[in-house]
Amino acid sequence: MEILVCVKRVPDTAENEFELNSAGNDLDRDDLVYSVNEWDNYAVEEAIQIVDKLGGNVTVITVGDDESEEVLRREMAMGANDGILLSDDAFEGSDGRGIAAILKAEVEKGSYDLIMTGAQADEGAAQVGGILAAMLDMPYASLVNKIEPGEGKITVGREIEGGNQEMNEIDLPCVLSIQTGINEPRYVGIRGIRKVAKVEIPVKSAGDLGIDAGSVGESGAKTKRVDYFVPDMGEGAEMLEGSTGEIIEKLIEKLKAKGGL
Amino acid sequence: MTSIVGPASFKFFGIFPSMIFSFIIPVIGVGLFAYIMARRLAPLLRANPDNRFDHIGQRVKNLIIVWLGQIRHPRYMLAGVLHICIFFGFLVLSIRSTSLVIVGFSDGFVLPGFGGSLGSIYNFFKDYAATVVLVACIIAAVRRGILKPERYAVPEKYGHDHTAEAVFVLGIISVLMISESLFEASQVVSESRFTDHAHFLAPLSLVWIFRAILTSASQNVLQGLHIFAYFVHDITFFFFLCFLPLGKHFHVITSIFNVFFMRVKKGNIKPVMHGVTDEQLDDLESFGVKKLEDFTWKHMLDFYSCADCGRCSDHCPADAVGRPLSPRFITIKARDLMFKNYPLTGEIYKSNLLVEDIYTEDEIWSCTTCGACEQECPLGIEYIDKMVDLRRGMVDEGMVPQSLQKPLKALEKRGNPYGKMEKKRADWANDKEFKENHKIKDLSDKKSKADTLFFVDSITSYDDNIQDIARRTSIILEKAGVDFGILGKKEKDSGNEVIRFGEEMLYQELKEQNSEAILDTGVTQIVTADPHAYNALKNDYGNLPPVKHISQVVAQKIAKGELDLKPCLDPDKVYVYHDPCYLGRHNDIYEDPREALDAIDGLTRVELEKSRDRSFCCGGGGLMLFYEPEEETRMGVLRVNMAAEIGATVIVTACPFCLVNIQDAIKVAGKEGEIEALDFTELIEQHLL
């Protein structure tokens, strides 16, 4: 089975403390560390497991700048066979539809049985998977937490509100957005990344993909971020301050005062 | 009528010379033994290299103390003394057994030099040796077969019980002792009838008793018994020799080698591959132990040498709390696999991934590397390096639990397992109250200079609860007149657990960054309050100025009169010192913290039964704090209960991880208010004059 997994480089939520920049329209990115979007790791792991069972190839793809190559290498260290970097100044500032359009151009050049994305990205809006499926006119299942591959079609499980599980048959080729918890992604250490450090990763520009530069990027974006802020504290909300011990003490006091304890 | 004849001249039914058997039995015995040993050597020849021919002086010393001196045996008094009796009995009787084989061809043969008075003296001791061994075997058999001490039990998941083999071998040894004595006694009785010479025998020895029993036996009976005893001994001796390499009694042969080649350095971890430098690591195809043949030959020799005494598991904290790990069975399972894959006849089988075949991933991650097992093993069997090698293999295969992946990634990105920002590493020094009175030099910018580097390490830098240790250590150093500074944001995690959890390349990066930053400062010594950091910098890095733990600094300054302490502020409390594994067992620092505590006038200090090199791990540090093991209780809870049992009200630790684990355990054990945990630095700082 030929599988394409779309991945994204994002600031790591576990290893950063987020602050706004002085302009107030984005994060202060000076001191951030980046990694693969967590959901994408699950998607890649799932793809590798399917290929281990049925044979085939896993290709990882991302839209981003030069530094995004790092996340492709990490996924290749996990076991993905190939990587493709879609990079062009014209891509900068793309909205979800723009990213999907760029990906679509590359997907159409290949012949994939299965296309996966993470269910969402730490910095995103969980829309690329759906838009990409629509653009490709392929069936789509979101929030997939179980995959059973079969002949010409696969069965996918989706987690439903309230902890229920739904199973669907879906024709191939299709697009799936993968939920965390579908598997246990394997560990990738520095050694793994060094092993694939010299593998060639093709970089494709708007021209290579045959995309009209004006239709993507900031100019082509139909949604624009107009503000970025930490929400004002609502009424009744109170931040307890101090050391952990002090915070706990204050909390207990408050709970006692209100009859909670 | 003549005296009875020996096996060299005796003829069965008057015609068939028994010497033929005296010849055939040793030839078959030695031949079979050589064949078995050759087969047993096969896996060792395919194993990975191991550099065990260094430190010859230390190795000879180990041989004298650990092997010949049996130093570790009396740690279990009854079993130990029984073993010492049998061990020395065997050593003494090995000479007799060798000469007995030759007696089969040459009646009355004695080894060169054993003809005269030396021979008489030897015979005297030999007779007692055989007697003592027999008595020891009987007691041991009763103990193993009837009393059945708990530590020999084999849980169902680990296979069959080993009692039968143990008792069988004790029986074989007893047969050897009895037949040897009967052989001699029958001859002595017979000879005494034809000579005036009264043969002196060691009173109350086995031979002496047999002589008394046989005094009135007929000459024919004596002759029959003499030959019968000889061949029973001969056959049993060679059977035993060939039986040894088939099970846990292989240690009778391998122990001398295993002890000679045992670990000579403490606290360090073996290189990924002996003979491969850190710079060449990238060229290695595979890391760590994945299959049987990835173990080093010494580690395989360890498997062969295990006597199944269960002392390792008896002291293993992971086993005690019901984690799926018992060091004894790490060895036994590997030995069973070696026997299975390298059978005595036929083809050698291909081995599979060990963590899928005989071990489980959780089993290998369960080890806290506390070293209690290695400390206890009378045969010098190693566990920590094997655990690390197995983990290296799992890391290389991507088999790392999710709970450990996050901190490992954070270590890679931020140099600490919490994923906190580098620039906040020295935030502990910005505490308002502390900052008003104390200024900490940051040596990383090269503007400040100091003789001493205070290496803080991750938990003490970032954990809200533990940062106090950093501040108190600074105050103590200041008071003791030590000119010191810190690395600030240039400091990375020491990586003590990173290397021990098998992430070698990440450890190498941390080591490189720390080494460069430390050497850049030009300091002449390093001080830390974290035993894990102490261990890594001292034993794993190997390229740094001398490293001291804060307890050593305090003890030395007190001894020199450069640091004075007040009388005890809480004289009613009962203090107990808990030895951190990485200070005690791995680095032999037992006395300094105790001396410092005892320098506080009026402080009541008690000792735990499990203390010093028998200290019980609190639950492990570094990455172990993130690992979520399957267990029935926490190690810390057991430790707190031990302290409560002896009436202690304050557990003094000298390690930030011990403090975290024991503080948590006090809550879990429901002993808040009864017992408290206190870091060494807190106690000392409170008592600074």
Image (cartoon, coloured by chain):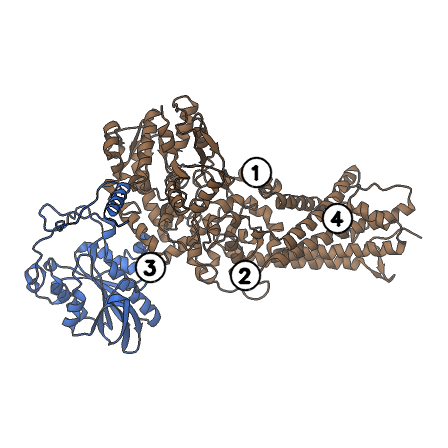
**Chain under numbered label 2:** B
* Mark toward the viewer: 2 or 1: 2
* Mark toward the viewer: 3 or 4: 3
Q: Is residue B404 above or below residue B546?
A: below
Which residue is at the far bottom?
A151
Measure the C-alpha gap from mark 1 to mark 4. Answer: 30 Å
Name the spot of residue A229 as percent of width and height, x first: 12, 51
Contact check, label 2 and label 3, Cβ < 8 Å? no
Q: Earlier in the sequence, mark 1 or mark 4?
A: 1
Which type of secondary structure does the marked residue at label 1 adopt? helix
Q: Amino acid at mark 1?
A: Lys
Q: Quadrant of residue A203?
A: bottom left
Residue occupied by mark 1:
B61
Q: Amino acid at mark 4?
A: Ser
Residue occupied by mark 4:
B99
Residue B159's mark?
2
Taking depth in this image into account, of A156 and B392 the one nearest to the observer is: A156
Crowding at dot 4, Cα within 10 Å, few <14 / some 14-19 / many 20+, comes out as some
Q: Colour of chain B?
A: brown
Residue A186's mark?
3
Measure the C-alpha gap from mark 2 to mark 4. Answer: 41 Å
Name the spot of residue A30 as percent of width and height, x first: 17, 46
Q: Amino acid at mark 3?
A: Arg
Q: Quadrant of the C terminus of chain B?
A: top left
